[in-house]
Amino acid sequence: MHGSAARPGEIPDSKRQMIVRRAREHFVSEGYAATRMEPIAREAGVSTATLYTLFTGKAALFAAVIDDAAEEFARQMAGVRAIEGDARSTLTSFAEAYAGFMGDPFVRSIFRLVMAERPRFQAVASRFFEKGRDEFGATLIGIIVRLSKSGELGPVERPSWAAGHLMGMVEHPVFFVPLVTGDEVRVRRTNAEVVAEAVETFLARYGV
């Protein structure tokens, strides 16, 4: 019923989405413990009673925020699956999209939030990380298998390992360094330089 008109007495999906987006801003900026339901309801233009009709409590709202973020991340990667071309251009296009995504400060803020609350929300955190792994990893594995079959890459015995090699070379400088340093330490290389070096190293190992 996404995007459809609500029946009398029902709460429109657009209103639910507004609540989730406002809640995300609060969870990211204030953390789980300090976030309160009343300001979220007020900013979303609904009563607190309506908020609790949709979400039984703060834990349910937090789970909805993280699931919504995971869906948004998946949509950002949807276009990467359609990449066509030779090995260098295809892998570069994927790596550029991945670096842009992993280098986004908002993405890091969501990961920090999930990591901070993982002990309390194990199932929610696991879904979030598994969806990210499947969206990114499965996409790249598919690209590697296709390039290997077409002769653009040499035989790749373990495509999942090869995908991990390329993603790891991108992740470390554009995601993990800023993640653990709170964005205070900036990698000197640009995303384009990181991607070029990663693809070159990957092709040296797996290219023909």
Image: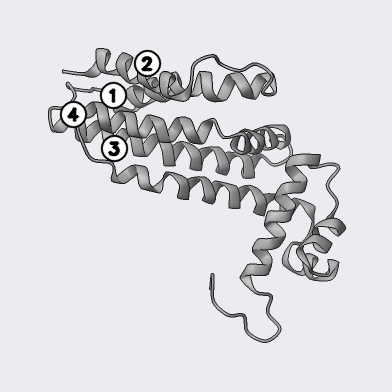
Q: Amino acid at mark 3?
A: Gly
Q: Quadrant of residue 182?
A: top right
Q: Disc 4 marks which residue?
A: 148
Counting from the top left corner in percent of width and height, residue 141 is at 32, 33
First in residue order: circle 2 vs circle 1: 1
* Image side of residue 32 versus residue 190, left or right: right
Which numbered mark, 1 or 3, is in the foreground of this view?
3
Work out how far the residue at label 4 is from the one at label 1, CA to CA, in angstroms. Answer: 11 Å
Q: Is there any visible trace of residue 31 in the rendered image?
A: no
The residue at which mark 2 appears reads as: 197
Image mark for residue 110: none
- Which is more N-terminal, label 3 or label 1? 3
Q: Amino acid at mark 4?
A: Ser
Write down the residue under mark 3. Answer: 142
CA separation, marks 4 and 3? 10 Å
Query: Is 124 situated above or below 8?
Result: above
Pick the front one: 70 or 182: 182
Q: Which x, y percent locates residue 142?
A: 28, 37
